[in-house]
Image (spheres, rainbow, N blue to C red):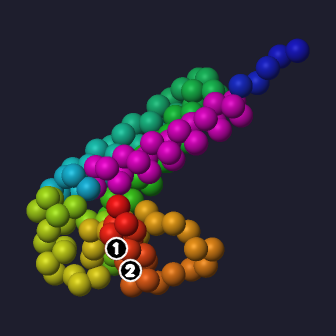
Amino acid sequence: MIFNYLGLAAGLAAFLGIWIGHVAVREIECRVVSITLPSIGFALLGFLCEIGAFLSASNLVSGTLGILGMTFLWDALEFHRQQKRIVKGRAPANPANPRHARILAEYPTATTLDLLKREPLGRPVGAQEAIALIKAKEKLL
């Protein structure tokens, strides 16, 4: 019996690429003063992976690089989308970051609170209710 590892490699590449990319975008966007360089870096890494996928003779390597390359290209766009989430108050701003401090000053919707770090109620809540829940939790601590 011959084993085909392409599906396993593709699945792992997708899972790890999405997981690591999600965490990296949040952490890098929170810390860097300008998102231009990380966006260009991820785009370049994505294009290099895609070129490697085209040039590889191995289906296993080609599939893995192709998936990782597309994930990196998507992450390059996610830096800008994450910044929009911060402006809208859907992701927390880092007041120690000058770019985020400017966002906090210019946009009343921006917040330093992570609205996802609260106990679930089993129903949708608005931003104001989520803030009230977080502040009530902080008083208990």
Which quadrant is home to the C terminus?
bottom left
Residues rendered magenta in the picture: 6-29
User: Which residue is label 2 attached to?
Assistant: 132
| Residue 16 place in picture, x, y as percent | 53, 39
Residue at (36, 40) in percent of width and height: 45
Q: Quadrant of residue 64?
A: top right
Residue at (19, 52) in percent of width and height: 32
Secondary element at image label 2 = helix
Residue at (71, 25) in percent of width and height: 5
Q: Horizontal placement of 100 versus 65: left or right?
A: left
Residue 139 magenta = no
Q: Residues within 10 Å of mark 1 (few under 14, many from 20)?
A: few
Q: CA distance from mark 1 to mark 2?
A: 5 Å
Q: Residue furthest top?
A: 1
| Residue 59 place in picture, x, y as percent | 64, 28
Residue type for callout 1: Lys
Does 129 appear above or below 1? Answer: below
User: Which residue is label 1 attached to?
Assistant: 135
| Residue 23 place in picture, x, y as percent | 41, 48
Q: Residues within 10 Å of mark 2 (few under 14, many from 20)?
A: few
- Label count reads 2
Secondary element at image label 1 = helix
Residue type for callout 2: Ala
Specify whether residue 75 is in view. yes
